[in-house]
Amino acid sequence: MAVSGRKLSDFQSSISLGSAEDFDHSCQPCLTIGQHVGAHGFCVECQEYLCKNCFECHKRTKASRNHQLLDKDNVGKHVITNKDTEECTEKCSVHKKEIIKFFCPTHKALGCNDCVILDHRTCKIDYIPDKCADIGDSKEHMDIMKKLKEKMKEAEDVLKKAEVRVKEMDKCHADIIKDILIFRKELNERLDQLQLDIQNVDDKKKSNDKKIIQKVINECASISTEIKKLQSSLQANKNERQNGQLYINIKRAECKIKSDEVKKAAEHLAKPDMQYTFKRNTDFENMLSKHDTFGKLSLSSSLVSPVKKNIFDTLTHKEDMNIRTKSDKYGCIIRGCAVLSSNKLVLADNPEA
């Protein structure tokens, strides 16, 4: 097992930096709860780096008050060894007092002794300390970091698309209001309430659509944050040679990469019913007393004016209709007719003619 030494100059250059990417050593107790804080000191007995708060707490805690603690001014008097360790330290989420030591490839599940006994008796189980040796330099670690980067890029791309959609909706809304106001100037005070009604409809539509987009933004932002956290944890685990925890986080990262969260978020943006335009009612002047006289919102992808339908009670002058084709040998005798929804007339000729 390789051993590397860290001297005072290396340590002091890292304790004042502000992120997991900027300092060489993180506070190891804080790492167990997902926080990355720069190291302020070192415990010789625990062989752990400590932030300022944990350093002070270490002095007061009964179990550690007699430990040899080195602050940033004295750490150079000792060479701090940083060894690879296959020891697992993370507690099981189900059995709180047990340590995660196993991984079930069949169920893609991390677990403790109790988990294996209760849920994976017939499974072929991997013992993490046996599997994690030199995992920090493995192809699996490199691949997972690459895939996490790609996953975060996907989430960021969807975020950018979401921002564009928000701008499009704002422009769409502004155009609608502009058309409404231009049209409103041509009318009298009778339109006040009708104007308010349609604006309320548009505002409600905009509000509902923005909730969908905001949900996408929140989901993608959350995914991006989780990926960054995983990337930072993986890097920190590798730096500290915490191979057991690195193995655990790699398996978590694999699940994150295989998830379809980003795809589902992107599908919300593909909804076709978010773009509307204001459409005037051409019969407005004759319909002031009716409910939807002022106008209505219409999808921008459907801008064709509706065809005015005529209602036929009876068909007259049938004898004047000539539907004879070149193949007909006799004259036309219309036996029936029907009006289609497309405003077309279908006529039935005498089948014997």
Image (tube, rainbow, N blue to C red):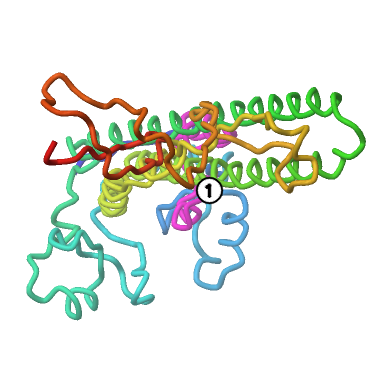
The picture quadrant where one finds residue 37 is: top right
User: Would you name the residue on which mark 1 appears?
Assistant: 70
Q: What SS does tag 1 mark?
A: strand
The picture quadrant where one finds residue 298 is: top right
Amino acid type at image mark 1? Leu
Instruction: Indicate the position of residue 350 as horizontal and vertical percent values.
Output: 19, 40
Measuring 21% from the left and 36% from the top, which residue is drawn there?
A: 137
Say how many tags the image has: 1
Looking at this view, name the residue that lies furthest to the top. Answer: 326
Depth check: 147 or 289 in front? 289
**Mark 1 neighbour class, 10 Å CA radius: few under 14, some 14 to 19, many 20 or more:** some
Q: Which residues are magenta?
A: 9-37
Instruction: Indicate the position of residue 326 as horizontal and vertical percent values.
Output: 15, 19
Q: Quadrant of the N terminus?
A: top left
Residue 103 in the figure: left or right of residue 74: left
Residue 283 in the figure: left or right of residue 139: right
Measuring 29% from the left and 37% from the top, which residue is drawn there?
A: 347
Instruction: Indicate the position of residue 236 as horizontal and vertical percent values.
Output: 39, 42
**Image vertical order of residue 279 relative to residue 55, above or below:** above
Q: Main secondary structure of the magenta part?
A: loop
Depth check: 130 or 208 in front? 208
Looking at this view, name the residue that lies furthest to the right. Answer: 189
Q: Is residue 79 visible?
A: no
Instruction: Indicate the position of residue 279 as horizontal and vertical percent values.
Output: 64, 30
**Image vertical order of residue 340 relative to residue 303, above or below:** below
Q: Is residue 175 visible?
A: yes
Depth check: 209 or 8 in front? 209
Residue 226 drawn in magenta: no
Q: Quadrant of the C terminus?
A: top left
Residue 17 drawn in magenta: yes
